[in-house]
Image: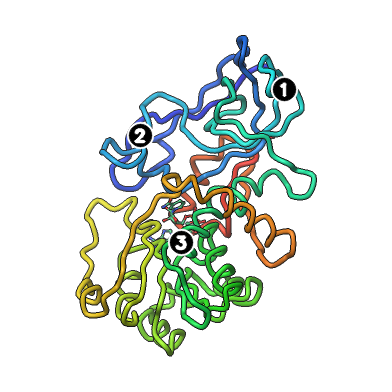
Amino acid sequence: MTTNMQVLLASRPIGWVTEENFRIVNTPIPKPAEGQILVRNHYLSLDPYMRGRMDDVKSYAAKQELNEVMGGRTVGEVIESKNPKFKAGDIVQGVYGWQQYGCSDGTEARKIDVSRVPMSAYLGVIGMPGVTAWIGLLDICQPKAGETVVVSAAAGAVGSAVGQIAKLKGCRAVGIAGGKEKCDYVVKELGFDACVDYKAGRLNDDLKAATPGGIDCNFENVGGEILDAVLRRTNAFSRIAVCGLISQYNATEPYAVKNFRMILTNRIKVQGFIVGDRMNLWPQALKDLAGWVASGELKYRETVAQGLENAPKALIGVFKGQNFGKQLVKLI
Ligand code: NDP
């Protein structure tokens, strides 16, 4: 291969992101200067936050600039090193974005051990999404054994870990996911106690049946009508970790929450969080996650799109629920 395929942000979406918002270009493979490394990316992580960065609005993360390579986490192999901290053949997790090759001074590259787990797992269950699940559940919600934990987008990268960790802590874990296949997976393969199919049209009734003792902790990934349904089932002194609001990311009109008063009447503690703000918790989280994966107590699944040119379609698919577990793109 002699060129570096890249995906750029061509235009900012209004409402739903489309494939036309991206542009694919082929550029020369960069040559590392003194102190730099050249990395061939094997996997690219596709994450819901990428949609927010495509907008020209103030947010916790810097916006994605137009006509620049889309940002994103990657894992790959160092193929040339002019940095004494790395050597050719090292496998690294980095933030090289939507491109086949990345070149940097290595500041954000972290060597990873792929002798026992595949490198792709470092973008999912033992990477940012897994740490997100750990922090939101254990640091923010702080569930006690016997309590009921509800998580939306339960078959996804973050949600699937949340419910399994809740079970490890002795809680009742209830997922909310789109479709019977996802709900069956969440209960039968991941071991949640119940899963509500929000697409079946009986969200309030089914959530009531799945949470006979009410809800003590809610790990919110979706927002909108799902959050409203959860609020109706909350117990006094329950906790809500607001992790994501994916139902709103492509919306042009914000959803007006109807059951906000439950926060007052049930004295609910609500806290939004961003995983990158809590770097002090990452080492413990990663240690726990890796241990649970090794012992088989934490299972994960991946949906892998083949080829960088299919990344735009795959990202759009995440907002349509087409992914099962962590959405990745395999680049080679
Ligand atoms: P997932 O793997 O869970 O994929 C997203 C899933 O969301 C889809 O598969 C789909 O599942 C569900 N979904 C999409 N659109 C809708 C909708 N309109 N209504 C209901 N469900 C929808 O993604 P992640 O695990 O990577 O992320 C999950 C959430 O966590 C996101 O909101 C994300 O922004 C957030 N997040 C927050 C972080 C933080 O630091 N605060 C860090 C990482 C993620 P289904 O088929 O079940 O509908």
Q: Label 1's element?
A: strand
Task: Give coordinates of residue 66: x percent, y percent.
Answer: 36, 27
Mark 1 sits near ligand 1, with its Cβ under 8 Å away: no
Relative to 56, say whether 190 is above or below: below
Q: From where the camera sits, is residue 25 visible? A: yes
The residue beneath circle 3 is 139
Query: Is the CB atom of the residue marked by disc 3 within 8 angstroms of ligand 1's nearest atom?
Result: no
User: As rendered, which of 98 and 102 lies closer to the eye?
Assistant: 102
Residue on which the image places disc 2: 62
Between disc 1 and disc 2, whose residue precedes? 2
> Which numbered tag is attached to residue 79?
1
User: Quarter of the image holding residue 288?
Assistant: bottom right
Q: Nearer the viewer, mark 3 or mark 2?
A: 3
Q: Residues within 10 Å of mark 2 (few under 14, many from 20)?
A: few
Q: Is residue 160 left or right of residue 120?
A: left
* Amino acid type, callout 3: Asp
Which residue does the image show at 42% across and 63% down from the upper left?
Answer: 140
Describe the element under mark 2 as helix, strand or loop.
loop
Disc 1/disc 2 C-alpha distance (Å): 29 Å
Amino acid marked by disc 2: Ala
* Quarter location, residue 29: top right
Does label 3 or label 2 sit earlier along the sequence? 2
300 shown above or below 164:
above
Mark 3 Cα-neighbour bin, 10 Å: few <14, some 14–19, many ≥20? few
Q: Are marks 1 and 2 in contact (CB under 8 Å)?
A: no
